[in-house]
Amino acid sequence: QVQLVESGGGLVQPGGSLRLSCAASGSILTIGAVGWYRQAPGKQRELVATIGGGASANYADSVKGRFTISRDNAKNTVYLQMNSLKPEDTAVYYCTMYVLRRSGGWSDYWGQGTQVTVSS
């Protein structure tokens, strides 16, 4: 089994910064693409950023220039550095990883979500 645990969410004022972390544990052989999604109240879950095994990153237009996704393969961890936060960034943020299990086979795994609230 594979578990993803997120941390780093919280309440921040507009213009502030937060860094989210997502650590994977369990029966992991290797991790492919990883990413962050978010879901605001009453809205569908949307892509925030993804990064492939080759470390090439893609971002939603709404966060380009403000958010940075990165990964530490040795720690099975993905990060999301969020700067210049806006009230419209308020949402529950979820990480996802495409994992090759030691028992064989690739699967998508999701974290439990972490709340980010941007408000004065």
Image (tube, rainbow, N blue to C red):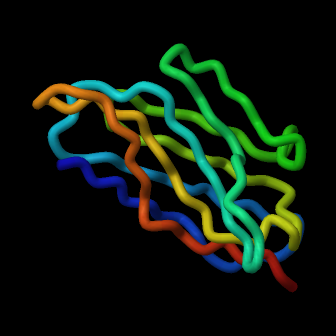
- Residue 27, quarter of the rendered image: top left
Which quadrant is the C terminus positioned in? bottom right
Residue 48 lies, in percent from the top left, at 71, 47
Q: How many marks?
A: 0
Identify whether 50 is placed above or below 32.
Answer: below
> Furthest-left residue in view?
103
Identify whether 79 is placed above or below 33.
Answer: below
- Residue 4, quarter of the rendered image: bottom left
The structure residue drawn at horizontal position 76% and vertical position 70%, both measured from the top left corner, is 43
* Foreground residue among 57 and 110: 110
Residue 83 lies, in percent from the top left, at 79, 53
Residue 62 lies, in percent from the top left, at 88, 49
> Furthest-bottom residue in view?
120
* Foreground residue among 8 and 50: 50
The structure residue drawn at horizontal position 63% and vertical position 53%, both measured from the top left corner, is 37
User: Horizontal placement of 36 versus 78: left or right?
Assistant: right
The structure residue drawn at horizontal position 70% and vertical position 39%, both measured from the top left corner, is 68
The structure residue drawn at horizontal position 70% and vertical position 47%, both measured from the top left corner, is 47
* Foreground residue among 114 and 14: 114
Identify whether 42 is placed above or below 4.
Answer: below
User: Horizontal placement of 38 versus 2: left or right?
Assistant: right
Residue 60 lies, in percent from the top left, at 80, 42
